[in-house]
Structure formats: structure tokens, C-alpha cells
Image: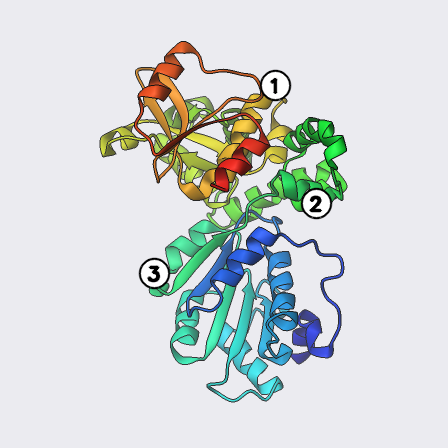
């Protein structure tokens, strides 16, 4: 086990381990903001979205900026087959033994793919209650976390890593736009809307990478974990979801198309949400309106959406992008008498997305003006949304 530990923790021997990694300041800032409290930090998000990279860059930050002893930091990926017979507590005790750490001394523990270990929540609670440890754990499955972290209620915080936004896309592409060349921004933004924000795909433009990523998620995170044998139905279901991205979705209509029961359709829908491939948005209104009205859905990534559907409407892609940018504000859609406004956030900010020069029609404008809101914004460009989020 010691050899495995040293392979996962090259900083113990003073080796550089972040040479080829690109920093995403937003994720690192969230980790920094929540690191000094006692709570367990869960990092979630789509497979291959950058969770492990974020953890390693944050470990570098702890060593170089916070001057934390590198020998008190343990990183382990719990999906390693060589560790299948060791539980989390045994791994931590072995770490303390290797590094001559006394019980009660401060530990910094990073567990990648935490849900690969049975009863992980019991073991994390034990660590939380009895050890002097700060714990960061990652998972690509929301359902595995939701079903098992009840023992950590009040003891955890969740940080979701989202796909790259436009500014991060430019960073990964090593594109710097001077003020003299600002006329090129729309061209690069169009490229971004077509490519999306999966880091490896942005760097390589390898379509097979995205195809294999979705295939792995459907097979490993959905079918295998939930004992679903007919993977073909899951793939057809996902294709229908991508075609409905940005629109209201009828669970019953999908069940009729695929000839599955409404309960099965609802279960599959939830599983795709839990795998971070889609995000549901409920209607704003009273409880019965929220429950009875169909949900709108958005794709987790534009590149994934574009792989499975034709690029017909950049306005729809832009709306999907804006949703991802404001997801933390818990937006819902506003619907009245057949007229829809795109987003009404939890703190009562009204947002309509109109790509470039598109305008509200007369009925939309009447509703937009009528709704009582703290602020109202028509978003037409990436600059508009960044300016809105900085307010």
C-alpha cells in the first residue's frame, strides 16, 4: 500500500505534479472559501469535468501558499483496484503510520471517487467526529451522494464543478483578445457555443472523446449502478433529452415514444439528472403549479448537446449557456397565459435571453414589464451576463 500512496502523492518527495494543469480560479476560490471550516467538502459534477485537476491544484495551493506541511496531505483515488480490500479508515491509519503522524494531529484528506467505497458516509462521519481532519471528497454520481450522506447532514457542503465558461474556454485555448481585436470576440464565442466546455475536448477537438465520455456515463454511472440491462433504451432516452434541451419536457410523451411505463420514464429522467448530464428547471409559481407543470431541461454541456443534435439555433445554445452561468441562483422559468420568460431566480431577478439583436415580442414585453422583480435584465451577449453577475 505504501508504494501506491507515494504514486498518488508525488509532493511527498518534492516532485512537481501540476505542470500541465490549467487553473480554474472559480473552483479554487470556492474551495478556499470553505476550507477553514470543519465541514466535509463534496466536489461533484460530470465525469471528466475537472474535479481531480481542481483537487490537485488546490493541494499545490495549500503547500505553496498556505505553507501546510506536504506530509500531512493525503490524496487517494478510491476506485483503484489495489485498494478494493481497504476501507477508508484503514487507508487513513496507514497514512498516519507511514508519515509518523500522532493521533490528534492535523490531517488534510482528499478522497477521489468516494462513492466507490461501501458505507463511505459512516467512515467519513467517524473521521469527522474523532480525527483532527479536513476532508475533501469527490463523486460523479449525485444519486450515490444523496442516498448516503444523511449521516453527514449539517457536516457537509457541496461544490459542483461545471463545464468551462467562455472566459475559461479562451484560457484553455490560449487565446488572448486585445482591445484592438475585440471585433473577433463574436467569432470565438460562436466557436465556444459549438464546442462547449469539457476541458479535454476543448484542448483536443476529438469528437470520439465526447462520444466515449457519454457512453461511459450511460454504461457505468447509470446502467451498471442501477441494474438496467437495456442500455439501448437509455441511449434513445438520452437522444430525446438532447433534442428537448431548452424546452419543456413531457415524461409521459417520452414513455409513449419509447414504449416504457411512465414510472420507468421518470426513473430514467432522474438518473440522467443524477449523472449530471441534464439539469431540470421548474416553473415559478405556487406549489401546485410547480408540481403539475412540466420541467424545462438544459444540457450539462453544449458540446455534448451538439454531438447528438444538429446545430440549428445558436439562440437556444446561448440560452443553455446562460442557464449554466446562473445555475447557482436557482432559476425557474416564468409562464403565464401561454407566454414564457426564461428565468426568474431565487432572489427575484428576472432574465430573458435574446441572442444578439433578437427582441421581445409584444406579449412577452407586456409580461416582462408586469412581473414584480428586484432587477430585470435582457441578456444578449456573454458580456451582458458577466456584467449582470458582477452586480
Q: Residues within 10 Å of mark 3 (few under 14, many from 20)?
A: few
| Mark 3 secondary-structure assignment | helix
Left or right: where 155 falls relative to 58: left
Q: Mark 3 — residue?
A: 150
First in sequence, mark 3 or 2: give its number.
3
Q: Position of residue 207 (x, y in %)?
A: 72, 36
Mark sitting on residue 171: 2
Q: Quadrant of residue 185?
A: top right
Q: Is residue 62 above or below residue 274?
A: below
First in sequence, mark 3 or 1: give its number.
3
Q: Mark 1 — residue?
A: 312
Q: Is residue 111 above or below residue 246?
A: below
Nearest the viewer among 57 and 233 is 57
Q: Residues within 10 Å of mark 2 (few under 14, many from 20)?
A: some
Which quadrant holds the N terminus? bottom right
Q: For the residues marked 3 and 2, what is the alpha-carbon distance in whole angstroms?
A: 38 Å
Q: Residue at x 60, y 33 (%)?
A: 302
Q: Position of residue 276 (x, y in %)?
A: 51, 43
First in sequence, mark 2 or 1: give its number.
2
Left or right: where 131 falls relative to 311: left
| Mark 1 secondary-structure assignment | loop
Amino acid at each position: 500500500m505504501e508504494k501506491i500512496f507515494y504514486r498518488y502523492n508525488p509532493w511527498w518527495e518534492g516532485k512537481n505534479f501540476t505542470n500541465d494543469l490549467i487553473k480554474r480560479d472559480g473552483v479554487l476560490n470556492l474551495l478556499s472559501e470553505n476550507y477553514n471550516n470543519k465541514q466535509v467538502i463534496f466536489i461533484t459534477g460530470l465525469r471528466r469535468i475537472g474535479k481531480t485537476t481542481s483537487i490537485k491544484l488546490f493541494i499545490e495551493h495549500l503547500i505553496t501558499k498556505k505553507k501546510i506541511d506536504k506530509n500531512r496531505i493525503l490524496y487517494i483515488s478510491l476506485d483503484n483496484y489495489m485498494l478494493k480490500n481497504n476501507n477508508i479508515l484503514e487507508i487513513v491509519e496507514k497514512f498516519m503510520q507511514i508519515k509518523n503522524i500522532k493521533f490528534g494531529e492535523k490531517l488534510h484528506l482528499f478522497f477521489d471517487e468516494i462513492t466507490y467505497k461501501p458505507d463511505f458516509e459512516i467512515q467519513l462521519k467517524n473521521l469527522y467526529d474523532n480525527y483532527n481532519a479536513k476532508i475533501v471528497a469527490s463523486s460523479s454520481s449525485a444519486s450515490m451522494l444523496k442516498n448516503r450522506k444523511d449521516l453527514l447532514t449539517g457536516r457537509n457542503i457541496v461544490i459542483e464543478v461545471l463545464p468551462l465558461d467562455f472566459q475559461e474556454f479562451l484560457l484553455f485555448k490560449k487565446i488572448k483578445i486585445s482591445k484592438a481585436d475585440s471585433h473577433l470576440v463574436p467569432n470565438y464565442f460562436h466557436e465556444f457555443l459549438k464546442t462547449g466546455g469539457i476541458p479535454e475536448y476543448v484542448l483536443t477537438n476529438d469528437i470520439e472523446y465526447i462520444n466515449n465520455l457519454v457512453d461511459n456515463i450511460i454504461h457505468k454511472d447509470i446502467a451498471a449502478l442501477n441494474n438496467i440491462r437495456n442500455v439501448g433504451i437509455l441511449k434513445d432516452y438520452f437522444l430525446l433529452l438532447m433534442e428537448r434541451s431548452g424546452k419543456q419536457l413531457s415524461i409521459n410523451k417520452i414513455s409513449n415514444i419509447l414504449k416504457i411505463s411512465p414510472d420507468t420514464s421518470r426513473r430514467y429522467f432522474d438518473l440522467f439528472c443524477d449523472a449530471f448530464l441534464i439539469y431540470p428547471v421548474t416553473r415559478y409559481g405556487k406549489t401546485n403549479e410547480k408540481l403539475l407543470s412540466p420541467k424545462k431541461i438544459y444540457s450539462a454541456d453544449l458540446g455534448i448537446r451538439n454531438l447528438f443534435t444538429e446545430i440549428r439555433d445558436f439562440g437556444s445554445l446561448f440560452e443553455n449557456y446562460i442557464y449554466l452561468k446562473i445555475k447557482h441562483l436557482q432559476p425557474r422559468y416564468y409562464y403565464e397565459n401561454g407566454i414564457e420568460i426564461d428565468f426568474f431566480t431565487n432572489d427575484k431577478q428576472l432574465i430573458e435571453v435574446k441572442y444578439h439583436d433578437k427582441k421581445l415580442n409584444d406579449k412577452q414585453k407586456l409580461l416582462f414589464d408586469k412581473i414584480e422583480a428586484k432587477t430585470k435584465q435582457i441578456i444578449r451577449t456573454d458580456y451582458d451576463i458577466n456584467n449582470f453577475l458582477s452586480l
